[in-house]
């Protein structure tokens, strides 16, 4: 649903900026972090912020000030998270293709945990740690073969994708890790996908983990940590109604279904649910074009600023912040980039829209700015903060 009414955005302030730009509501970010802390209070839970969702330094600083750790996927992210104040021990490092320099950087800084995705990677980490006279703390990323029922590009826990070690190979990889002198095996890591709103796949994940833990306990193997990754979804269609994700419901799944062992800690890697709703992409209407009975709103923001609609057919709420019209019309909302996929919305109902109107594309705080590019030699979008 699209509307120009009832927005919680500070319109007069936004009108002063040149477009396109990202606007971040830092108060909403604080309330979101508060809601997470409240939902996990008293539990042995550690939350690592998935920096890939938004690596903006101000956002990261606020997240780390609230006491969260970081989930990282590159040397660049490790350096940025260190600079933004995240302690190295609170870092987890995932990804199927860790380069030697990135492994060295992680060992130099003594990060909390490598999430290891393959046997060759485990061997290389052990070798580099030997050369550096270090011990690498490691969790094995397990592919639990659970379908998270989300977009196929963002489901990661099924047998046919590149992530993790299969359940059949797990035993031999654990034996191998335990035999390596420069590897300290801390636990098991999982991540089944992103934008997950149905909790059933998480219940299945808990059951798989319980089964695995029982099996390994019989063999005398205990893990000090379990990491269940991230993936909690947010409401893209009605952000004003649901500005904060349902953390209570999400963490309750793990409280009720996962049998943690005494002294074991449970780790989460949340990205989207922390930052999606606090960010909007602000853009001005360049032209309204009519062609063959269709009306196009052409924005000055494009797929280079927010690629999610083009890449995942993602739906974001569009708001015309300045139209005073009560009458509405149906528009396709597009950007200026030379690609047909540079389309933000089809058949969007907006109040009558004209050149110069300010449009907010909501729920853009996660995987918006962080996935922006300079294709067509366009400038990267800047950020404006509520504080
Ligand atoms: N942990 C691992 C190992 C991951 O691969 C991801 C996301 C996360 C944690 C964080 O997931 P989150 O809580 O943000 O769902 N660009 C896509 C999303 C890609 C997610 C990739 N992995 C999008 O815009 O929808």
Image: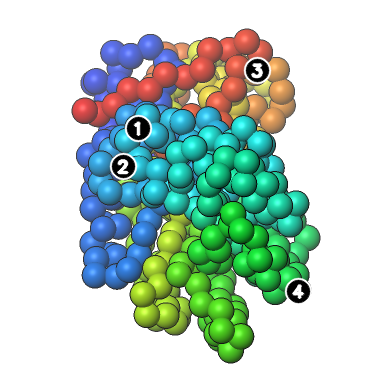
Is residue 173 toward the left or the right of residue 286 in the image?
right
Which residue is at a point 57% across and 49% down the rendered structure image? 94
Q: Is mark 1 within 8 Å of ligand 1?
A: no
Which residue is tagged 4? 168
- Give the image quarter of residue 184: bottom right
What numbered label is drawn on residue 375?
3
Mark 1 nearby-residue class (10 Å; few <14, some 14–19, many ≥20): many
Query: Which numbered disc flags the more N-terminal residue, 3 or 4?
Result: 4
Q: SS class of the residue under badge 4?
A: loop
**What is the distance, in whole Å, between disc 1 and disc 4 at their CAs?**
40 Å
Q: SS class of the residue under badge 1?
A: loop
How are the colours assigned in the image? rainbow
Query: Which numbered disc flags the more N-terminal residue, 3 or 1?
Result: 1
- Residue farthest toward the bottom in the current orientation of the protein: 218
Which residue is at a point 46% across and 46% down the rendered structure image? 111
- Residue farthest toward the right in the current orientation of the protein: 160
């Amino acid at each position: 649903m699209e509307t120009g009414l009832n927005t919680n955005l500070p319109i007069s302030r936004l009108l002063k900026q040149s477009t396109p730009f990202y606007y971040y509501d830092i108060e909403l970010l604080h309330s979101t972090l508060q809601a997470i802390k409240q939902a996990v209070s008293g539990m042995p839970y550690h939350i690592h912020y998935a920096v890939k969702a938004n690596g903006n330094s101000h956002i990261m600083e606020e997240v780390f000030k609230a006491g969260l750790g970081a989930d990282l996927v590159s040397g660049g992210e490790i350096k940025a998270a260190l600079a933004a104040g995240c302690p190295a021990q609170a870092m987890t490092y995932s990804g199927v293709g860790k380069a030697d320099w990135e492994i060295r950087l992680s060992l130099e800084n003594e990060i909390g945990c490598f999430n290891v995705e393959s046997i060759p990677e485990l061997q290389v980490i052990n070798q580099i740690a030997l050369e550096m006279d270090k011990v690498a703390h490691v969790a094995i990323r397990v592919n639990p073969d659970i379908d998270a029922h989300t977009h196929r590009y963002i489901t990661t826990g099924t047998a046919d994708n590149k992530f993790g070690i299969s359940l059949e190979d797990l035993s031999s990889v654990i034996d191998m890790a335990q035999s390596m002198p420069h590897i300290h095996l801390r636990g098991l890591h999982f991540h089944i996908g992103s934008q997950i709103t149905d909790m059933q796949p998480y219940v299945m994940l808990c059951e798989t983990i319980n089964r695995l833990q029982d099996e390994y306990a019989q063999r005398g193997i205990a893990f000090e940590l379990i990491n269940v990754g991230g993936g909690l979804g947010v409401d893209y269609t009605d952000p004003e109604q649901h500005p904060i994700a349902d953390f209570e419901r999400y963490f309750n799944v793990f409280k009720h279904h996962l049998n943690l062992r005494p002294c074991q800690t449970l780790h989460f890697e949340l990205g989207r649910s922390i930052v999606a709703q606090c960010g909007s992409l602000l853009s001005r209407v360049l032209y309204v074009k009519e062609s063959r009975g269709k009306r196009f709103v052409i924005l000055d923001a494009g797929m280079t600023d927010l690629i999610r609609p083009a890449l995942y057919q993602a739906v974001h709420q569009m708001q015309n912040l300045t139209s005073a019209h009560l009458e509405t019309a149906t528009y396709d909302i597009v950007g200026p980039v030379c690609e047909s996929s540079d389309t933000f919305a089809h058949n969007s109902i907006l109040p009558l829209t004209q050149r110069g109107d300010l449009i907010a594309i909501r729920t853009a705080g996660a995987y918006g700015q962080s996935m922006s590019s300079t294709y067509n030699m366009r400038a990267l979008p800047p950020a404006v903060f509520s504080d």
